[in-house]
Amino acid sequence: MEMTEQILTKIRESVRRAKEGAFYRGHFAGIEPEDIRSLADFERLPFTEKEDLRRAYPMGLRAVDEDEIVRIHSSSGTTGTPVIIPYTSKDVHDWAVMFKRCYETAGAGKSDRIHITPGYGLWTAGIGFQAGAELLGAMAIPMGPGNTDKQISMMIDMKSTVLCATSSYALLLAEKITQRGVLDRICLRRGIIGSERWGEKMRRRIASELGVRLYDIYGLTEIYGPGIGISCDRECGMHMWTDYFHYEIIDPRSGLPVPLGEVGEIVITTLEKEGAPLVRYRTHDLTRDLPGDCPCGRPYPRIDSLIGRSDDMVKVKGTMIYPSRADELLAQVDGVSSEYQIMIDHLNGKDIVTLFFETATPDEGGRGNLERVVKDSFKEKIGLTITAKAVGMGDLPRSEKKSTRIFDNRY
Ligand SMILES: [Zn+2]
């Protein structure tokens, strides 16, 4: 992204604020905000990694007086120490303003009834969807995750018009609604789907089974939460609210910016955040910048839908596999569902890749044919010999959180 004098000024201000906190005082020791005079100076600043934020536990990121903090959130601590992000009331408000803008971009307004299935709690998801809905003046239905039967009956009785969910949970709901034959009692018109990487085939299934238009929303707990960007009606990438943050797309290995339009990792610097400003935060999300203006006329730049996580990319026999490539490949095979899992094992000195996919085809012969097609296509398009195994529809686990596609069991 280009860097205007206005953004540089905001970055200097953000660095100054960040250094009020214990974490950046150490991390940026010897770096003064006035030293950042150009894009090149900015690109020399050290990155901030999630591991750094863990070391700041519990409140080392706090960059304002304790009295100014009105809320904390925490990103998932499945591995080790969680990350705590403190918010001031301005931070909470700014997040709601961005989220309201997301709803508006998705065509939602005051008369909508917004069915929120992401979780509430330390996690930023549910409450972000809720605050944005309330600021919009719509009616929030704060379901949280789970209890699919109740979700569907509330959806019918409350006449929910907007569904907020992860892609895997939206798919589960769509399947259950179809199974029960209650689609004609569902009033949903739009789905706002969390920025988990999801294939075109899964998107088409959810949209057609629920009869809704879908929007991809982007965000992460460390930078407010979901709602810092969303796709518009034109379905050509997600607009990013760059009046609140600056982003870069870098090569995850070299740390250098990639040429415009090439895939890399998105790195974010907050411009307005008070409680825990972050500078050059590595998200590990892979995407690319979409050049040019969106036909919708919004002035905000766009990134492509997420391609995966830089840490999900796995190398097998010198070939890179990332989930989106498998998504694309399976989308082109008739009779195969969007759900799959890839297992990588190391047996007798060799790496073995097994891809499990779902199909509605019941007979052995049909399944055998599909397995051959998937195997050949993998060899042809990705350059890797795999074992393909067909399983029945619904046999692979669905999750309410983000689903993992590739399991590397080699280490
Ligand atoms: Zn647009």
Image (cartoon, rainbow, N blue to C red):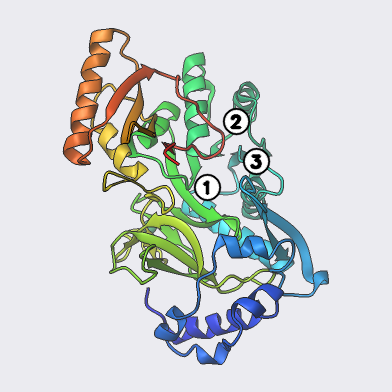
Q: Disc 3 and disc 2: Cα gap in Å?
A: 21 Å
- Residue drawn 36% across the image and 42% down it: 323
Q: Is residue 299 left or right of residue 352?
A: right
C-alpha distance separating marks 2 and 1: 15 Å
Query: Which of disc 2 and disc 3 is earlier in sequence?
Result: 3
* Residue occupying the far top of the picture: 363
Residue 223 visible in the current orientation? no
Q: Position of residue 289 (x, y in %)?
A: 34, 63
- When asked about the image quadrant of residue 250, the answer is bottom left
In the picture of the structure, the residue carrying the numbered disc 3 is: 119
Q: CA distance from mark 3 to mark 1?
A: 21 Å
Check residue 159 in the rendering and tell me which mark sits there, or answer none.
2
Asked if marks 3 and 2 touch (Cβ < 8 Å), the reply is no
Residue in the picture at 56% in, 74% down: 271
Label 2 vs 1, first from the N-terminus: 1
Q: Is residue 215 visible?
A: yes
As drawn, 19 above or below 47: below
Displayed-image quarter of ligand 1 = bottom left
Mark 3 or mark 1: which comes first in sequence?
Answer: 1
The residue labelled by disc 1 is: 108
